Image (tube, rainbow, N blue to C red):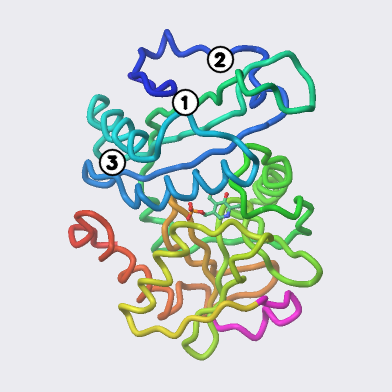
């Protein structure tokens, strides 16, 4: 396997991280997960733009221009013959003696990217999943795709130990998002989701779902969904790069559309699939 390290493709055995890398010591960095379908990188521009934005928000200078980075990612996919899978990419503030303060300008950001297995979870997309709500204990800059994922990890682990697929997080009585997904609820045919502000990550899949709503003629609205109103909604679903549009059939003790994926969610699954490279080959 070849790994992208800054702007070079190196072998797996040459891809080494320094013990004083700030990503390792402080979680001082950002990341992206990108999906490859049918050998084609899906929404590469959007992921690279989000990476650039995250970098800017935490004052990291990327090791090269976005256009060069895109070319390197394409090479990475091609040299590793990724057909259906994912690319994980992270950028840290670089290597320097441990100190909370930013290092000097001579310390360069460190970027790595490599292929990761990723398969469409078709069975779960058909059956739907169960989720539980938990308090959102994260910081107030969830719009930055930071390597610091402790709040997310603790929530996902707690959900998993309760045999739930996802933890849906609540901040001040409002549903924000899942531990690694965006959250949506449907009422009378309209899809609602949290506004893309500092309390959620503006998912690339979320942006595509908004586009898919347009194609499918499904009304879409950004609003804070109150946790106490969750029982009033007809359908609930979550989304991410790896799970796409995933129906939630049970959330805590609430059951949606008779424990099966609801009609609006199913229409959106279809509309979303139509946006994928080679999307029309997917039956589910
Ligand atoms: C907290 C959080 N929200 C939302 C998402 C969905 O983002 P995307 O659709 O870009 O994968 C993710 C993805 O990892 C996430 O970690």
> What secondary structure is found at the residue carrying circle 3?
loop
Above or below — where is 211 with respect to 278? below
- Residue 4 occupies quadrant: top left
Real-space Cα distance between discs 2 and 3? Answer: 27 Å
Q: Residues within 10 Å of mark 1 (few under 14, many from 20)?
A: many
In this image, 140 relative to 14: left or right? right
The one nearer the camera, 19 or 227, is: 19
- The stretch drawn in magenta includes residue 121: no
> What secondary structure is found at the residue carrying circle 1?
strand
The residue at the point 62 percent across, 28 percent down is 93
Q: Residues within 10 Å of mark 3 (few under 14, many from 20)?
A: some
From the image, tell me which residue sits under label 2.
Answer: 17
Residue reaching furthest to the front:
105
The residue at the point 18 percent across, 58 percent down is 281
In this image, 86 relative to 109: left or right? left
**Could you say where residue 207 lies in the image, as x and y percent from the top left?**
44, 64
Ligand 1 lies under 8 Å from the Cβ of mark 2: no
From the image, tell me which residue sits under label 1.
Answer: 112
- The stretch drawn in magenta includes residue 232: yes
The residue at the point 36 percent across, 44 percent down is 119
From the image, tell me which residue sits under label 3.
Answer: 84
**Could you say where residue 175 lies in the image, as x and y percent from the top left?**
69, 69
Which span is picked out in magenta? 224-234
**Could you say where residue 5 lies in the image, as x and y percent from the top left?**
43, 21
Real-space Cα distance between discs 1 and 3? Answer: 20 Å
Give the label, 1 or 3, closer to the camera: 1
Nearer-N-terminus badge (1/3) = 3
Above or below — where is 258 with respect to 76? below
**Could you say where residue 113 lies in the image, as x and y percent from the top left?**
43, 29
The residue at the point 54 percent across, 31 percent down is 91
């Amino acid at each position: 396997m070849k790994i992208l390290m800054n702007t070079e493709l190196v072998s797996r055995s040459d891809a080494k991280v320094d013990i004083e890398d700030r990503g390792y010591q402080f979680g001082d960095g950002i990341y992206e997960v990108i999906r490859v379908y049918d050998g084609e990188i899906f929404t590469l521009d959007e992921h690279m733009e989000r990476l650039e934005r995250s970098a800017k928000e935490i004052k990291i200078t990327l090791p090269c221009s976005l256009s060069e980075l895109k070319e390197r990612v394409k090479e990475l996919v091609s040299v590793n013959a990724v057909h259906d899978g994912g690319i994980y990419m992270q950028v840290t503030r670089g290597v320097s003696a441990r100190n909370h303060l930013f290092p000097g300008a001579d310390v360069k950001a460190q970027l790595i990217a490599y292929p990761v297995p990723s398969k469409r979870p078709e069975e779960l997309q058909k059956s739907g999943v169960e989720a539980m709500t938990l308090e959102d204990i994260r910081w107030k800059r969830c719009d930055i795709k930071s390597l610091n994922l402790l709040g997310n990890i603790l929530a996902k682990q707690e959900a998993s130990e309760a045999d739930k697929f996802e933890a849906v997080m609540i901040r001040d009585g409002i549903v924000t998002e899942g531990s690694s997904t965006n959250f949506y609820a449907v009422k009378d045919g309209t899809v609602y989701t949290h506004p893309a502000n500092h309390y959620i990550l503006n998912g690339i899949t979320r942006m595509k779902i908004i586009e898919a709503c347009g194609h499918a003629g499904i009304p879409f609205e950004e609003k804070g969904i109150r946790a106490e109103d969750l029982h009033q909604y007809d359908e609930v679903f979550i989304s991410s790069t790896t799970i796409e549009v995933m129906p939630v059939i049970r959330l805590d003790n609430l059951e949606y559309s008779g424990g099966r994926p609801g009609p609006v969610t199913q229409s959106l699954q279809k509309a979303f699939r139509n946006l994928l490279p080679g999307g029309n080959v997917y039956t589910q």
